[in-house]
Amino acid sequence: MKVLKFGGTSVGSTKNINKVISILGAYSITDQIICVVSAVGGITDRLLKAGTLANQKDKGYVAEFEAIKKTHFNLVAELIPKQNKSVLNHVENTLLELKSLLDGIYLINELSPKTSDKLVSFGELLSSYIITETLKNQKANAELKNSQELIVTNSNFTKAEVDYSLTNKNIKAYFKSIDHKITVLPGFVSKSKIGEITTLGRGGSDFTAAIIAAALKVEQLEIWTDVSGMFTANPKLVKQAFPIEKISYQEAMELSHFGAKVLYPPTVQPVFDLNIPIHIKNTLKPDDAGTIISKNSTNNKAPIKGITHISNIALLTLEGSGMVGIPGFSKRLFETLAQEKINVILITQASSEHSICFGIETKDAELAKNTLDATFENEISLHKINPIILEDNLSIIAVIGDNIKNHQGVSGKMFSALGKNNINIRAIAQGASERNISAVIADKDVKKALNTLHERFFEVKTKQLNLFITGVGNVGEKLIDQIEQQHNFLKKNLKIDVRIVGLANSKKMIFNAEGINLSNWASQFHYADKSSLKGFLNKVIALNLRNSIFVDVTANEAVAELYADYLKNSIAVVACSKIACSSTYENYKNLQDLSLKYNAPFLYETNVGAGLPIINTLNNLVASGDKVTSIQAVLSGSLNFVFNNFSDHTNFHDTVKRAQFEGYTEPDPRIDLSGIDVARKILILARENGGIMEIEDIQNDSFLTPANLESKSVDEFYKTLKADEAHFQKLYASAKAKNCQLKYVAEFKKGKAKVGLREIPEGHPFYNLEGKDNIVMFYTQRYPEQPLIVKGAGAGADVTASGLFADIIQIANK
Ligand code: ADP
Ligand code: ASP
Ligand code: MG
């Protein structure tokens, strides 16, 4: 004998009911089958909605009723297309009864728990009848038995308690007497000893099946639903979740109690002592293995089996100095809650005894606060304790597993993963059984928390990075290309899943929480929303994805001004724009502090030397205790290009034009030629070395003429370059006479920094610096004579993009 229960989705459509029928057909060849069914998917909710509308004197209940009627008539018409008159008559009569009940509620304006139970019982009564008739129509040896005649409860309406001695007797007697193969029963519904209609609580059809399975001591209870087992987390919220092969009764109970809806929590209770395994199966994919719930968990020693959550939680705190050392406060607190039938889901008490904090369902919060304030009225008026503090819009998340007790540091891992993602924890509880660690967090953080913890405990190997890129010019495009190319390599070899979730240019922005398809990202801009910097920021915050990184590939001051907002929301920032780091020291320092405070990396390796590891090298020197005594560097790829190509055979104006044409200068070449860009770079290096400096502190010996420096536009600047050609030729001739090369050099020594054009003699490491290369020499205590040198291409879209990419990967490895 086997007990199978089919849930709402499994009996929710003709197609699915046909699947149920074929499963029953296959089983009944060898076995006697007991089939418990839920109401057709969504009908219980609809019945309750119709009842509520009627109760509120809202005629809308009629439309709800009509929808319920239509669903059932359609099913009959499709499942039993011929000679279905008697079935339709029966369904029609049952619906008429339902209609008059609803009309009654409307008339007298009352919907008591007792009436509500009567109302919702129609769902299961209808579905079980239709399924039995379908089976019979297909010549199956099936009969319907109303479980209200078997399951006896008290009168605790909407969640009645079972009288097992009467119920077990009824079940045994009935099943002894039958000789048909398949018995179909409605789940969820029952009757009290005095014949009132009761129900076993929402989701209670699972429980009905378990009660019958236990009464008959069958070998196995099967719960057929719309997912392939109990998952490591709710598969609707965590894409990477997977079915758990085997799980213990206790683990399943904890998971379901903490929100894994796939199993109604009391279901385990009747089968537990008898050691009857529960097998969770998927009606839509009957070949999938599903989950076995039994006495033994797997041999798998992983500490965590699953992660769950309960929404709509309120946290109440009773606190006050008057509680310390005085017994009886918690007794009175919990007695009051028990009297009001308020279920406490989580409790924590600090060892100082100064406060007790507990979590309950939001719907009970007001009542709990008012009654507790009344209970402690006297102490509150004497200021021994404070009125109850009530916080709302919260959820509980819990990690669950029998093996938590055998592993150290599970809570450490849990809380550090949440903390790293800026998920604020309001309260923590760990059951003495050590099978469960729970935390109270904001509702808005639930999805992120579930995914973060799932990644931490089940996908340790793959880390997802969610990128939001602003600026899709030369460098931005290259970066997207590189990410697309490397995606599979990174996933396979470094276990990093890099996804671009948001992209913006100055006009439009696109988002896709599952990752933008990079093969055609540019064309997606055609249909995109208008972009705004604040709008982009708000969307990144609203998406609230773990490991979010904002990547600034613009040279826009307004973008740089928003870094602080990103960091404050624990969103990492990677920037090639040097505006922020070379702005005021106060701003630079503030961003560093925010990065530390909110655990959000702020990386900008490409600010100096494009993709060359200059800032990283300096940071490593400083972190390892070395002291930098001086920095000598050529940091402008554009100026190096200009002076490598300028000679007495060329002219200065054309050389600068060419540098701009080939993309080596800023859009405004004055920023490079004036030395300001180099000054900013050495300023950043000085700051990274611990220097408190402003841009004005950098001595800038410009080689330009006053006319060049005073030009009001780029065009005018070029004109002055032409006019002052003799000045530049003089600079060249002077260097040539000494057999020197002209290099624009940045220096930092003894807390001072300067930039300027220098004549570099043959043999000096700068002398042969080619093309647009950069070079940095770090003289330190550990490298006193032979400096540590970093040298290579210091400009260009490709190398800048790869520098940004390296920063991104560095964040993944943090
Ligand atoms: P039925 O109608 O078959 O009783 P339910 O809707 O009550 O089905 O339960 C199945 C649903 O439970 C799944 O569709 C899924 O959305 C939800 N669920 C929540 N947590 C889990 C989990 N950990 N594993 C599987 N399903 C879960
Ligand atoms: N139909 C009831 C509900 O929706 C019972 C069940 O489906 O298990 O809660
Ligand atoms: Mg269910």
Image (cartoon, grey):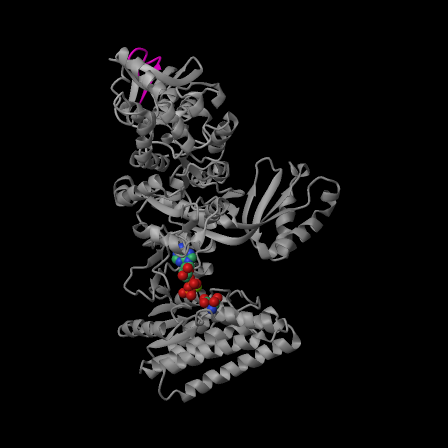
Residue 370 vs 653, above or below: the answer is below
Q: Is residue 594 visible?
A: yes
Specify the quadrant of the image occupied by residue 663. top left
Q: Position of residue 370 (x, y in %)?
A: 68, 52
**Is residue 191 visible in the rendered structure shown here?**
no
Residue 566 x %, y %:
48, 39
Give the farthest residue toward the front: 723
Number of on-image labels: 0
Taking depth in this image into account, of 573 and 791 the one nearest to the observer is 791
Depth check: give the residue in front, 410 or 470.
Answer: 470
Q: Position of residue 278 (x, y in %)?
A: 36, 61
Q: Residue at x 46, y 69 (%)?
A: 42
Please give left or right for residue 444 compared with residue 646 in the image: right
**186 horizontally vs 485: left or right:** right
Above or below, comparing residue 84 to residue 665 in the picture: below
Position of residue 379 in the picture relative to residue 71 (left or right): right
Pick the quarter of the image with the C terminus: top left
Residue 572 position within the rendered picture, expressed as x and y whole percent measured from the top left = 43, 38
Asked if residue 685 is among those painted magenta in the image, a careful observer would answer no
Front-most of residues 334 and 387: 387
Residue range (magenta):
775-787
Q: Nearer the viewer, residue 712 or 245?
A: 712
Position of the N terminus by quadrant: bottom left
Q: Quadrant of residue 627?
A: top left
Q: Quadrant of residue 666?
A: top left
Q: Residue at x 43, y 50 (%)?
A: 508
Q: Is residue 486 above or below residue 527?
A: above
Task: Judge whether residue 786 is colored magenta.
Answer: yes
